Image: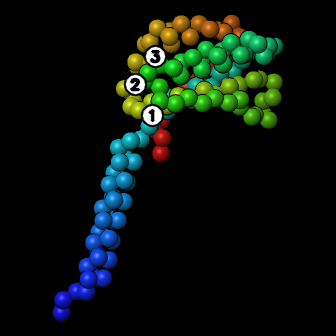
Amino acid sequence: MKPSRFQVVAFALSLALLLGLYGFASYQQSEKLYKHAVTVTFKSGTSDTQIGVVDKSFKGLAKLKMVRSYEWGVVDDAKDPDHVKHVYVFTFGDKNDLPLYGASPEHQAHMKVGAEYIEAVSAVQYFQQ
């Protein structure tokens, strides 16, 4: 018994859809972005203007060619309301971009900006899931 034209077209469309989904899933797995998140805790008494200088310096790093995207925000920590903490997140296309970013003259100069206002800095890196 020969399949009908409808059955052949339905099979072809199903196969194309499955192959397309497989290709998209493979593409997504190979394109996991690398994130670098920095949390800065400012010393008590640091003014908004002084914090703004640090914020502006971080934002300037987003212009580096290896940075794909940048975002930042203020930590909402009811357990520690006396400390102002900001988080700065940089996205890279590849894990190998982070050392280039860190060694850049712009980053080296940035590390000195506002140092007198900063109590603590922590950073984590991860692949976006």
Which quarter of the figure has residue 54? top right
Instruction: Decide if residue 98 is in sight here.
Output: no
Q: Is residue 4 above or below residue 48?
A: below
Instruction: Decide if residue 9 is in sight here.
Output: yes
Q: Residue furthest bottom?
A: 1
User: Dot 1 corresponds to which residue?
Assistant: 34
Asked which secondary structure carries label 1, the reply is strand
Do the residues bearing badges 3 and 1 touch, measured as CB atoms within 8 Å?
A: no
Where residue 10 appears, as percent x and y from the top left, is 32, 77
User: Dot 2 corresponds to which residue?
Assistant: 97
| Pointer 2 or 1: first along the chain | 1
Q: Amino acid at mark 3?
A: Gly
Q: Is residue 96 above or below residue 5?
A: above
Cα separation, mark 3 vs mark 2, equals 9 Å
User: Dot 3 corresponds to which residue?
Assistant: 102
Which quarter of the figure has residue 82? top right
Asked which secondary structure carries label 3, the reply is helix
Q: How is the image coloured?
A: rainbow
Q: Amino acid at mark 1?
A: Tyr
Locate the N terminus and report the quarter of the image it occupies. Answer: bottom left
| Pointer 3 or 1: first along the chain | 1
